[in-house]
């Protein structure tokens, strides 16, 4: 694994010799990856390369899949998240996630956002209202929904629902946001809005995004990691990876030889 | 052409199945309504039986059936939902939960008279509750428990995993997720189990035969430990005992009509609650909750 000389920012998350198994299947092979603070890191690669598996490890959503096993470390804020004493609730408040398909709760728009602060035990109505407003503003959704906060979230368009999910993640004030193919089910206009939003959020959050769309990776990310068959093939600044890929596989993938 | 004829035949066959089923259902209701109608009167609903069951009303039996049914639901609902949540959310896929699942399904197939004997042995004798509302409710509760567990499990299973993931991913605990997201979403399905349970509990005779029911009891039950009259058992008694079969038969049909009406009434309450939750949680994308 090489590092670009220019890539000297603080790693927010660092994986060390990370291996992951689904039963007997070795899904991630010795991954060493630095996720840099206040930057967007894109994970790209063909289907089944392990990029979604990897992103779901950072907030331990992988725990939901039975018969899996992780080896190695993921260092976040001085601790290994696989430590037995890791508080999953705290970890997931720090590392938020936006999923492939918009998954708002079947509740009102307001309740979708207030859920996060509420489960943390916040009872102050004014505080919650402000948090909801602030989160919706950050997700560029406030103007769309401010007059119908108390109507169903399921009545929104797919793109709005996805931005609602982003707002919901922001409402618990995470430091890192994981995007697992956030635009996979969206039309081009909604996709553009999400991408714009990611560039905006980058100012305050560390972002990791899995995407099938290479153009998307080149548009939104500062760093790109190319994965293939469970290996991290190449990692570096996006400009460099896209213009002068060092590995032949990366070059082939980026030029569409396979994918 | 040939395919079209086959399709027409298939459709006719399916229609016939539906019509035959509907006819039976309508027939039962018509039969009970016609025969039971003569017995109905205000007095029938509000007065106790007179002249060795051949006159008067069946009010104590109505009250008794209501208590027993409600008692069984109050007992079985929390127990069944709790059990289903445990099986579905905490031990899903485990060997133990598979065994419990099979056991629950088998429990549903046990004849009701066996539940009656069990209730007699455990609640009436061993725990010393006597022949009482409490013993009867608990026995009926166990009888409807498998149905409530299965319905609840199905309902929990139907809650999209993506809701669960979303909740956990913003730092909710498993319990918060269950309480605030999964259970509300599953509630309509759970209530379907309750509705079926109500019908079953109200109508069963064998389980209360030894545990709760009295052929005749003066006055109304005044505690959980009272013996009670109950409609299904009352029907049975009217048709098999006594000295005035003609009048008793008419009263029995009246009881049957009331029993059907009661089940319909209690079920519609549950259906009402279910629909209220359904509209709040889901079906139909363009629904405004607060409007």
Image (cartoon, coloured by chain):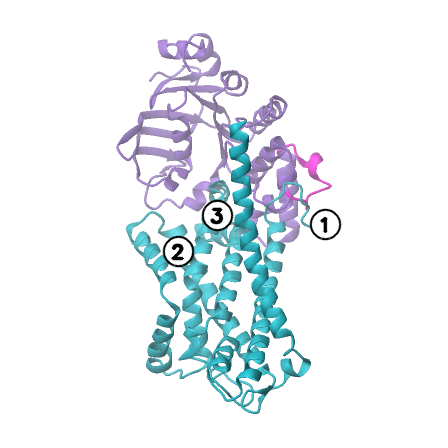
Chain colours: A purple, B cyan
- Give the answer, above or below, for where A228 lies relative to A106: above
Q: CA distance from mark 3 to mark 1?
A: 29 Å
Mark drawn on residue B172: 3
Chain designation of label 1: B
Give the residue number, with chain letter if any, for mark 2.
B86
Foreground: disc 2 or disc 3: 2
Q: Say which element carries label 1.
A: loop
Chain designation of label 3: B
Residue depicted at x 61% and y 62%: B268
Could you tell me residue B59's position as x and y percent? 59, 82
Instruction: Specify the segment rendered in magenta.
Output: A139-152
Q: Classify mark 3: residues with Cα within 10 Å, few (<14), some (14-19) or many (20+).
A: many
- Give the answer, above or below, for where A7 lies relative to B274: above
Quarter holding the N terminus of chain B?
A: top right
Q: CA distance from mark 1 to mark 2?
A: 36 Å
Q: Earlier in the sequence, mark 2 or mark 3?
A: 2
């Amino acid at each position: 694994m090489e590092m670009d000389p220019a890539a000297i920012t603080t790693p927010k998350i660092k994986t060390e010799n990370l291996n992951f198994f689904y039963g007997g299947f070795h899904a991630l092979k010795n991954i060493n990856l630095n996720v840099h603070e206040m930057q967007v890191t894109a994970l790209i690669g063909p289907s089944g390369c392990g990029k979604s598996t990897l992103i779901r490890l950072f907030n331990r959503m992988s725990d939901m899949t039975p018969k899996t096993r992780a080896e190695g470390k993921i260092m976040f804020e001085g601790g290994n998240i696989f430590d037995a004493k890791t508080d999953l609730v705290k970890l997931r408040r720090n590392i938020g996630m936006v999923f492939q398909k918009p998954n708002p709760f079947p509740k009102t728009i307001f309740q979708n956002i207030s859920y996060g602060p509420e489960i943390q035990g916040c009872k102050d109505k004014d505080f919650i209202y402000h948090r909801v407003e602030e989160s919706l503003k950050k997700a560029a959704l406030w103007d769309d929904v401010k007059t119908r906060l108390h109507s169903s979230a399921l009545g929104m368009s797919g793109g709005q629902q996805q931005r609602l999910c982003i707002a919901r993640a922001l409402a618990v004030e995470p430091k890192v946001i994981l995007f697992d193919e956030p635009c996979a089910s969206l039309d081009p206009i909604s996709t553009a809005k999400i991408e714009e939003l990611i560039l905006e959020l980058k100012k305050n959050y560390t972002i990791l995004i899995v995407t099938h769309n290479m153009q998307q990776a080149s548009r939104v990310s500062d760093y790109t990691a190319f994965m293939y068959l469970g290996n991290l093939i190449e990692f570096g600044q996006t400009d460099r990876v896209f213009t002068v890929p060092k590995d032949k596989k990366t070059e082939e993938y980026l030029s569409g030889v396979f994918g | 052409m040939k395919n079209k004829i086959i399709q027409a035949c298939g459709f006719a066959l399916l229609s016939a199945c539906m019509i035959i089923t509907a006819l039976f259902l309508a027939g039962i209701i018509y039969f009970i309504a016609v025969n039971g109608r003569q017995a109905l009167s205000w007095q029938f609903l509000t007065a106790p039986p007179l002249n060795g069951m051949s006159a008067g009303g069946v009010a104590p039996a109505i009250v008794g059936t209501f208590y027993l049914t409600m008692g069984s639901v109050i007992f079985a609902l929390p127990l069944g939902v709790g059990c289903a949540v445990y099986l579905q959310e905490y031990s899903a896929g485990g060997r133990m939960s598979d065994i419990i699942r099979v056991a629950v399904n088998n429990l549903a197939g046990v004849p009701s008279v066996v539940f009656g004997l069990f209730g007699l042995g455990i609640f009436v004798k061993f725990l010393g509750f006597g022949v009482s509302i409490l013993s009867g409710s608990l026995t009926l509760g166990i009888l409807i428990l498998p149905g409530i567990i299965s319905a609840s499990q199905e309902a929990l299973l139907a809650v999209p995993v993506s809701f669960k993931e979303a909740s956990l991913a913003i730092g909710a605990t498993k319990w918060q997720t269950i309480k605030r997201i999964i259970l509300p979403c599953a509630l309509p399905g759970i209530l379907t189990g309750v509705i079926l349970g109500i019908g079953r509990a109200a109508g069963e005779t064998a389980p209360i035969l030894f545990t709760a029911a009295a052929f005749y009891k003066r006055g109304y039950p005044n505690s959980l430990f009272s013996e009670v009259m109950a409609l299904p058992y009352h029907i049975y008694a009217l048709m098999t005992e006594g000295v005035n079969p003609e009048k008793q038969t008419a009263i029995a049909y009246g009881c049957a009509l009331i029993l059907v009406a009661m089940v319909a009434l209690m079920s519609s309450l549950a259906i009402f609650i279910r629909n209220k939750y359904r509209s709040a949680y889901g079906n139909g994308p363009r629904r405004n909750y607060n409007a």
